[in-house]
Amino acid sequence: MKIAISGLGKMGSQIARKLAEDKHDVIAHNRSPDPARETQKYGAKPAYQKDAVITAFGGIPATIWIMLPESIMDGQIDDWLKLVPKGSLLIDGGNSDFRKFKKRQERVAAAGSSFMDVGTSGGVWGYKRGFCLMAGGTKDDFEKIEPALKTLANPNGGYAHFGANGAGHFVKMVHNAIEYGMMESLAEGYRVLKEGPVDNLDLAKAGALWQKGSVITSWLNELTADALAENPDLKNINGVVSESGEARWTLEVAKEMDLPMPAIQAAFDVRLASQKGEVNFATQLLSAMRNKFGGHAINPGE
């Protein structure tokens, strides 16, 4: 299918590459030219300005997958709506607040086009392993982009349609909040191994063993063991851990519904405390995990 990818960061560039290599007609757009230029190596067509994206569609309705932060999404939607022909489809594939999707969908519909959300998980490994894609929007729009979703999920990922606008990002938001709790539990456990009464334990060896038939076998634990094998004492990691919004939004929704979330709340609070200087081996390991699966800065802000 013909599709534009706007925003060629760590995940957007992988999405553009994976689609282009599977013979989709990909137009790659980025506000700085170098990432777009790079896409030519794997068969995408670079577009350095938004109007160049529209020109590449030759006057027909455009399908544009936007991989950009929540903080600028409304402005991006407005900019695209000034350019796209009626009947176009805008897709928000970033980490956005599902509560804003009803108004965004109404704004896009009023301009004569359609809007979808596709929560995208897989981090920097999605190109190789396959992405996990959580979609919201009309069934017709979902079926329109399903060929692209099939490519992006290959070989070991998956995709599903969860309902109207916002449903996909709601599922992705809760996914990320669960991720916070799982990461915190692993980090605390490895800290006990590190600082507990048994000296000189090989943490990477314990993690590797836990990958062989234990109840906590997981890709996240595999990445944690890998990080510890590479840097057993987590040297040069300051332990400050960023939070990107999803757990915060989940906790806000849960509070509105009077749903206690003690594990996710505790994990979230640890990240906030780390940003105020409360760091330790566990927060260092959290930062190492984030770097392993998402390519996030190991020492944010430096």
Image: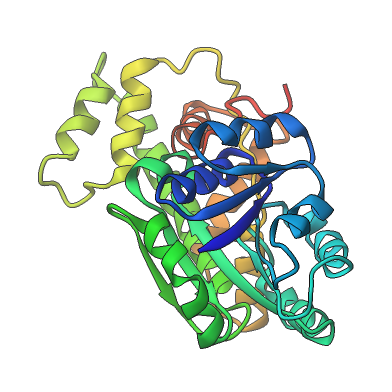
In the visual, does 123 lie left or right of 109?
Answer: left
Specify the quadrant of the image occupied by residue 276.
top right
Residue at 48% x, 55% y is: 24
Q: Judge whether 254 appears above or below 290 on screen.
A: below
Residue at 48% x, 29% y is: 288
Residue toward you, 16 or 279 = 16
Q: How many marks?
A: 0
Residue at 45% x, 78% y is: 161
Q: Work out which residue is located at the far front of the displayed protein and give it.
A: 58
- x, y percentage for residue 242? 64, 40
Residue at 33% x, 57% y is: 157
In the visual, does 77 lie left or right of 14?
Answer: right
- x, y percentage for residue 114? 69, 80
Tell me if residue 281 can be seen: yes
Specify the quadrant of the image occupied by residue 73.
bottom right
Residue toward you, 248 or 219 = 219
- x, y percentage for residue 209? 15, 33
In the visual, does 128 lie left or right of 175?
Answer: left
- x, y percentage for residue 98? 66, 73
Q: In which quarter of the image is the C terminus?
A: top right
Colour pattern: rainbow
